[in-house]
Each structure stands twice: as C-alpha cells, then as structure tokens.
Amino acid sequence: MGPDTVLTVAEEAQLEKWIIEKALLGFPMHPDELKDSVQRVLKTINRPNPFVDDRPGRKWLKLFLNRHPKITQRSAETISKARASVSEAGIRNWFQELNEYLQHENCAEILNDPSRIFNGDETGLQTCPKTGKLLGPKNYRNFYEIASGPEKECITVLCTFSAAGDSAPPMVVFPYKRIPRDIAVSFPDDWGIGRSDSGWMTSATFYEYIANIFLPWILKRHIKLPILLLLDGHKSHIGMDLYNLCTQKGIMLYCLLPNATHILQPCDVSVFKSIKVHWKEIVRQHKQKTTKSITKNTFIPLFKKAYEQGVQPSIIKHGFRKCGIFPFDADAVDYSRCISKRREEQKK
C-alpha cells in the first residue's frame, strides 16, 4: 500500500461523481479546474498537505486518475469556424438528449411548466456604445461624437429569465476587491453586486449569484423544484461548490449546444437585444442632458432604466418560443440561421 491520500476516499468519490456528471451535462473539466477546486477545499478545511500553496500538481493528478479509472483525459476537438459547423442534425440531437436526460432523472414534466425552465447568461454593456448613423453637413467626410464614457469600458451583467416571462434579479460585476460605497448604495435592494479582479464573471461570483440572489428568489416565489437552468457552456463557471449546492437545492444545470447560443439561447435571441437597444437610447438621452461621462459610479441608475424598459414578459417568452425551449419543440427552431444549412441550400 502506498502513502495515505490527501483527500479521503469519500471526498475523492465526490470529486469523481462531480467530474463525470459535469461532463455528461456538457461541461467537461480542464485539469487545472480540478486542481483549483482541490486547492479551495484544502484551504477551507485547513488540512496539512505536501502541495505548494495547497494546490496539487501533475503527479497528484496522475495518481488521482489511476485511482479513478472511470475518468480519462482527452484532447479537446479543435473546431474551425465553430458556429459555421452547427447543423440542424446537431441541434435536433441536443433536444433529444435533453429530453432523455430529464426522463432519466424522472423530471420530464419540467418541460411542460414554463415557470421551471430558466436561461442564465452574462453580457457586456459598454459605457460608450456606438449610437449608429448621425446627421451632419453633407460636405463633411467624418463626423465626430464626444464619448459619454471611457470608450472601451465594458461592464458585465448576469441575467436569468424563465420561460414564463419572469426575470430574476440580475448581478452586475465590477473590477473591485471592495465595492465603493457610492456604487453599492446605487444598487436596487434585490440586485446582486459582483466583484472580480477583471470585472468578468468568475466561478466565485457565479456561485454568489446562484446562492445569494437566484436561489432565494426561487424560494421566495415558491417555484416548484427541481428547476432546469440552461447555461452557455463557454461562459458558465461551475465549481464543485456550486455543483453541490445546485444538486442539494434542486437546480438542474444543463449546457446549451456549444456554438449554437445564437440559435438556442433565449437571452441572446431576444432579451439582450432588447436591453441593449434601450441602453443605447438611455445613453443618448444622457448625453443630451449632460456632458458628464458615464462611469462605474453612475452606471447602475442608468442601466436600471434600460433593464426595466427592455425586459418585458412578452419579449422573454418570445425568446424561449423562438428557440424551441418552450413550448419544447425542435421544429420551432429557425434552422435557416445555421450557416451549414445555407451552404446546403446553395448547393441545390
């Protein structure tokens, strides 16, 4: 027998279960993500270990895989022009697999209840969005518009909507370790305040959103559990702590078909477009009233107006219907948006 493992048999079994189920749901794990998760566990429980800064290395990973032969490492398939490769057959197969998964979990009735079907995603809002074509003298070759804020500054917003047309409180992420008071007091009481070094969504901020904003909102509204939460696999950040929380609380995470969110994700298909249209209008009105730039400190009150105007039940429902998510119908999808479909038609 070799030396004792750092994690217990039960803890490693839980890791194995998490890795396998995460992959089955469409979120295959990078080895570094596993190492990061183990590091967080060891730091939390303060258990002595031989690792540098509590983070296991390649040797531990190799031994872990030897102890758990159900898990294997494979190179990711490199897809050139990925979105162009999305096909009608692939989308229909995704619908079938989701239906089979829910049947296997004895939860197929979720697909008949719009209040239990959700889509969550993040988007970026520029403090100085392009306003489109402008009017000016015909003999001027170039028009110049004074920017309303830092031209390249983009603020991340995480939103979640249900097929019933409901919207959970959003989270806005700022690049701070501590949120300045002026920003914190500008938030509506039920909105989430996210923090990360980059201002982008991370596994920690995503966990905070689910645990502290989304789940309490679900429970307060007495929505029947379990629920289905559809996520973009490229943007979601599902750590073991989030996986455990969702498993315990009845939130079934499922990955949308990779590279097909422009066809299958209600957030992208309808709601975010509406929010950004209204955001541009809010920015335009702001520039007419003042020469002051839109900054992180002034973002929330302005975005709140765009959110309230752009997020309407009819728009949300339209997105789910157009994506074929609710009513659950693969035939409702607009397959003409598949580039591969257009190429096939051109060959005929």
Image (spheres, rainbow, N blue to C red):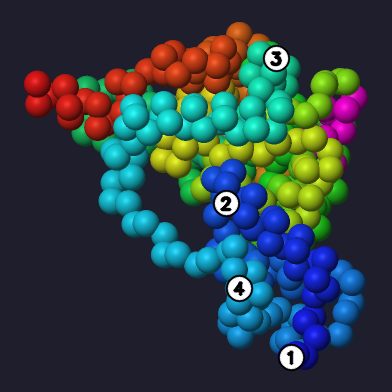
Secondary structure state at the residue bearing disc 2: helix
Which residue corresponds to mark 2? 23
Dominant SS in magenta:
helix
Instruction: Tell me the amino acid under the disc marked 3.
Output: Asp
Q: Earlier in the sequence, mark 2 or mark 1?
A: 1
In the rendered structure, does residue 172 fall within the stretch colored magenta? no
C-alpha gap between disc 2 and disc 3 = 26 Å
Neighbour tally class for label 4: few under 14, some 14-19, many 20 plus, Cα within 10 Å: some
Image quarter hosting the C terminus: top left
| Res 272 visible | no
Which residue corresponds to mark 1? 2
Q: Nearer the viewer, mark 1 or mark 4?
A: 1
Instruction: Tell me the amino acid under the disc marked 4.
Output: Leu
Image coordinates of residue 243 in percent, x first then y, are 74, 49
Residue stretch in magenta: 212-220
Q: Are marks 2 and 3 in contact (CB under 8 Å)?
A: no
Which disc, if any, is residue 173? none
Instruction: Tell me the amino acid under the disc marked 1.
Output: Gly
Quadrant of the rendered image containing residue 318: top right
Q: Earlier in the sequence, mark 1 or mark 4?
A: 1
Q: Nearer the viewer, mark 2 or mark 1?
A: 1
Q: Earlier in the sequence, mark 4 or mark 2?
A: 2
C-alpha gap between disc 4 and disc 2 = 15 Å
Which residue corresponds to mark 3? 113
